[in-house]
Image (cartoon, coloured by chain):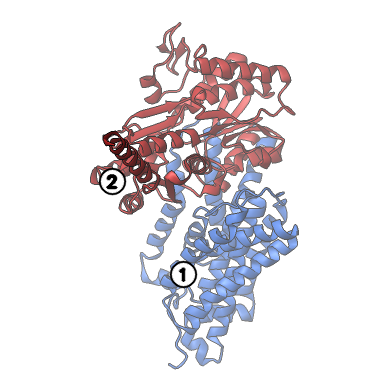
Chain colours: A red, B blue
Amino acid sequence: MKNLIKLLTIVSVFFCFFLNSAYADPKKIGFIYIGPPGDHGWTYQHDQGRKHMMSQLGGAVESTYLENIPENADAVRAIRKLASSGHDLIFTTSFNYMDQTLEVAKEFPNIKFEHATGYMRADNVSTYGGRFYEGRVIEGHLAGWLTKTNTIGYIPIPEVIRGINAFYLAASKVNPKIKIKIIWAFTWYDPGKEADAANTLINQGADIIVQHTDTFAPCQAAEKAGVLAFGQASDQSHFCPNAHLTAIVDDWGPYYTQRAQDLVNGNWTSGDTWGGLDSGMVAMAPYNNKIIPAPIIQEVINMEIALKDGSMHAFEGPIYNQAGELVVPEGQVADDGMLLGMNFYVQGIDGDIPQ
Amino acid sequence: MNIDLILGIINIILIATTPLVFAAIGELVTEKTGVLNLGVEGMMLVGAVTAFVTLVITGSYFLAFLFSIISGLIISGLFAFLVLILMSNQVATGLALTIFGIGLSSMIGKEYIGTPINGLNPYFFIVLSFVIVFATSYFFYKTKMGLIFRAVGESHLSAHALGYSVIKIRLLAILFGGAMCALSGSYMSICYAPMWQENMTAGRGWIALALVVFATWKPNRILIGAYIFGGVSIMQMNLQAFGFSIPGQFFNMAPYLATMIVLVSISSNKLRIKLSSPSSLTKPFFKGR
């Protein structure tokens, strides 16, 4: 009898525990977006990540997002609004939310924050980002093979020097005569201006357009002018089917799911994640087999595998900067510290980095 | 430098400047009759989204531009009702119109973001923009009706005393401004960057407003100002691609800087202000007095 009571107690305790966890309040997870989720670029991919997380974790989490939040004092207001309305984990998905995220995180020590592409952390602030430059290696390789005018047009925003260098190193390996023409857009988002920049580059002889801005305007301009282009952040092939070679796709879903799961399980800790092709955070959109010859597709698929298993690196020495100084010696690869602080062009790229 | 390259640059400048010309000439006509409408950006966005959505649904370019212009007439008609009949403050109402336009266009266009369309050849609209500017200039300085429009802007009380309907004339000018802004927006979403994206005009409405001041309210100077601004921004891209490094931020602020210089120079003496800007600008007209 005594044993039976003991057993019943244990069972009921377990049962209560089970009930408790089953009916626990779902964790609330907030997202701050820089653009509209429908931009088919950067924000779109973050929203896809959020949806993936929701589908994986079901009732254990709830999510909210605030869109079109400018990277200024307004962001503080937006982040604080999420923090003070019962959210347990908040993802701020653009680089220039860094100070604002840390400011609000200090006020709410019990709430967890995750800042995309940043480098400043705190006990309750993690950072995460993708090694997009690995995708640039593949794009550079393709561009090196496919250009006829040996001229590539590149439309970047500052912060992406790494991508330009990785692209050029890979492209010049295949095609030493290659030239990159760069037009800085100084905006993430202005379809008209992005189209102007693409048209200017095409007019100056570029036959492949690479972009780092947020909309598909450059790809569309390339399609119209009959030249080639790479999509950005998301597979943009249906906007420019005859120009689109491939695109670097940001896949945040598995990371968001993992972090939300950690939060639910109570083992979320602050840290930094910089995931490349191997983690799946960076992936390549389908290669356009109408334009790219099959052997080259096979080559880049092999490159993807090599980048994943580490037998190939985007920045393998010897690498020289524009002044001709050796920055990465032969037989070595650039370490993460150098990659994060990279503010020089490699030898062979013309022009200066805007300050 | 070969001739193809130069022709290519001119082509890009023409394509990029045309939306500024449409919006600025519309606003100029409105301001000439003494009404300041700061809602240019909002009206452009509503025009852009209406044209895009109409094109996606009906597939007709003609209907797209027609409905876009109608949407511009409706939204500027709303503005006219507020400032002419209800006598609300023009500056505040115009700003509200811009904010309203941004929100409304995002809401209408939500389902259509990223829908691919075939862009329309822009050359007809480039020619049209020149024709409208010259016609406006002719209207203001060579016709009697134009003189009446200007009189309403200079002194609405005198015009009223002479028996002209100030409200009716201002309504016409506001509607024309709305239609031109909508046309500018639809040109952007159908010819220039054929897509719909929230807030895709990216501040061009404000540049158009600055251009009206830059042009000191003279229609032909709108063309000069717009092509200086458009040309400078395209040339800096070309210089960058040729490998010269120029601070692009400078060119982003250039239109506003130039406007400030013109403002300072025209306001440096009282006579110049009187000669340049319509004297009744932003002043409400009360019929009873």
Of residues B50 and B72, the one drawn nearer to the viewer in this rendering: B50
* Residue that label 2 marks: A104
Task: Give the image quarter of residue A81.
Answer: bottom left
The residue at the point 61 percent across, 47 percent down is B13
Of residues B42 and A114, the one drawn nearer to the viewer in this rendering: A114
Determine the secondary structure under disc 2: helix
From the top left corner, tell me how far across and down residue B146 is, in percent.
60, 77
In the rendered image, the vertical position of residue B87 relative to residue B227, given as above or below? below
* Residue that label 1 marks: B94
The residue at the point 47 percent across, 26 percent down is A131
Residue sticking out furthest to the front: A1
Determine the secondary structure under disc 1: helix
- What's the amino acid at mark 1? Gly
Quarter of the picture containing the C terminus of chain A is top left
From the top left corner, tell me how far across and down residue A260 is, in percent.
41, 38
Q: CA distance from mark 1 to mark 2?
A: 35 Å
Of residues B219 and A88, the one drawn nearer to the viewer in this rendering: A88
Task: Give the image quarter of residue B90.
Answer: bottom left
- What's the amino acid at mark 2? Val
Left or right relative to B47: residue A88: left
- Mark 1, Cα crowd under 10 Å, few <14 / some 14-19 / many 20+, is many
Chain letter, disc 1 residue: B
